[in-house]
Amino acid sequence: MTLKKQLEDLRDRAIKNIDSTLTLNDLNQIRVEILGKKGPMTEVLRGMKDLSASERPVVGSYANEIRDVITEKIEKKKIFLEAVKLNQTLKEEKIDVTLSGKKVPQGVRHVLSQTLNEIEDIFLGMGYEIIEGYEVEKDYYNFERMNIPKEHPARDMQDTFYITDDVLLRTHTSPVQARTMEVHDFSRGPLRMISPGKVFRRDTDDATHSHQFNQVEGLVVDKGITMGDLKGTLEVMVKKMFGQERKIRLRPSYFPFTEPSVEVDVSCFKCGGTGCNVCKHTGWIEILGAGMVHPNVLEMSGIDSNEYSGFAFGLGAERVAMLRYGINDIRHFYQNDFRFLEQFKIKE
Ligand code: PHE
């Protein structure tokens, strides 16, 4: 067989094999077998040494041509097989984007925290400071400095958890008034503060009573503070909390630490004042206690009551939240039932 014929046979066999190959591995095998050092192509080229000088270049270039044809054929097949393999992989590893994802539940700020934050924002906007007091307080600040001496009948109004004879769980946030007044430096401006926080009373828990709840104390002391300032301030707060159409009403009341003392009502936001079950058909809802700071309280804090005057108020945070959202049981705030808490989505 001539070398030329051998080369053509080799080419035809290679092309047939390459065409029928199905994997990249087999293809590589073919390349090594045909074009490799020990393969038939090398053998043909080796046989060229027996050719005459005139035949050699002719057969040589023919051999190169055929090697190029085979190489190109292999390259093309390689590209094809790679594409097939990629398609296969893409098919197998396809991500099903229609599968529904896992829901990450979003928490809700506690309705009481939301209410307290709102009240704080209102007063911060009017230039008040927020002061924190102590939940475990001295009898002295909780009562004496609030003009409620020992044996004073007003102590019965607030059933107290005593820790020792002199230390108790505060029954109201009013002791923060005394603590703030005794350190305030009036040369730096008037005293304007609110103090939100927990208070404790020996009450039996039911729908409207709790042994623990939250108050927001308010206190303003300066020269020339009047009842008009108190009323105006509370009006601003009430309108922001309950709506611009709300009115407030002051009724005479009694607290040992304020004189005069008032109970503050807001016009019913459910019926608008005509009477309904929320306002018990009076058109008004009681929301807080307030008054002008008693001269004794100012004097005990080292403030001259002839020069300075002030107003104070104390608001129950649960009561405000219950009224606003129509919550009918104060115990909901502490039972941590998600079905209750989730209803109050953050409005930030
Ligand atoms: N401390 C009073 C209470 O708990 C509320 C109050 C505060 C009343 C300030 C007047 C002024 O009942």
Image: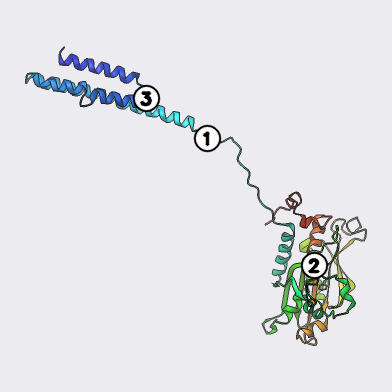
Of the numbered discs in the image, which one, if any, rests on residue 23? 3
Mark 2 crowdedness (10 Å alpha carbons): few <14, some 14-19, many ≥20:
many
Give the left or right position of residue 28, taking residue 333 as reference.
Answer: left
| SS state under label 2 | strand
Of the numbered discs in the image, which one, if any, rests on residue 200? 2
Circle 1 sits on which residue?
95
Q: Can see residue 222?
A: yes
Q: Nearer the viewer, residue 54 or 33?
A: 33
Residue at mark 3 to residue at mark 1: CA–CA distance: 26 Å
Q: Write the residue at 69% across / 69% down.
A: 124
Look at label 3 and name its amino acid.
Thr
**Residue 23 vertical placement versus 175 (above, below):** above
Measuring from the top left, give residue 274's x and y in whole percent: 91, 58
**Residue 319 vertical placement versus 140 (above, below):** above
Looking at the image, tell me whether mark 2 or mark 3 is earlier in sequence order: 3
Do tag 1 and tag 2 residues touch (Cβ < 8 Å)? no
Residue at mark 1 to residue at mark 2: CA–CA distance: 58 Å
Measuring from the top left, give residue 50's x and y in whole percent: 9, 19
Q: Quadrant of the C terminus?
A: bottom right
Q: Quadrant of ligand 1?
A: bottom right
User: Residue farthest to the top?
Assistant: 1
Q: Write the residue at 20% across / 27% down.
A: 37
Measuring from the top left, give residue 277's x and y in whole percent: 90, 55
Looking at the image, tell me whether mark 1 or mark 2 is earlier in sequence order: 1
Give the left or right position of residue 289, taking residue 50 as reference.
Answer: right
| SS state under label 3 | loop
Q: Write the residue at 76% across / 63% down.
A: 240
Residue at mark 2 to residue at mark 3: CA–CA distance: 81 Å
Q: Quadrant of the N terminus?
A: top left
* Residue 249, quarter of the rendered image: bottom right
Look at label 1 and name its amino acid.
Ile
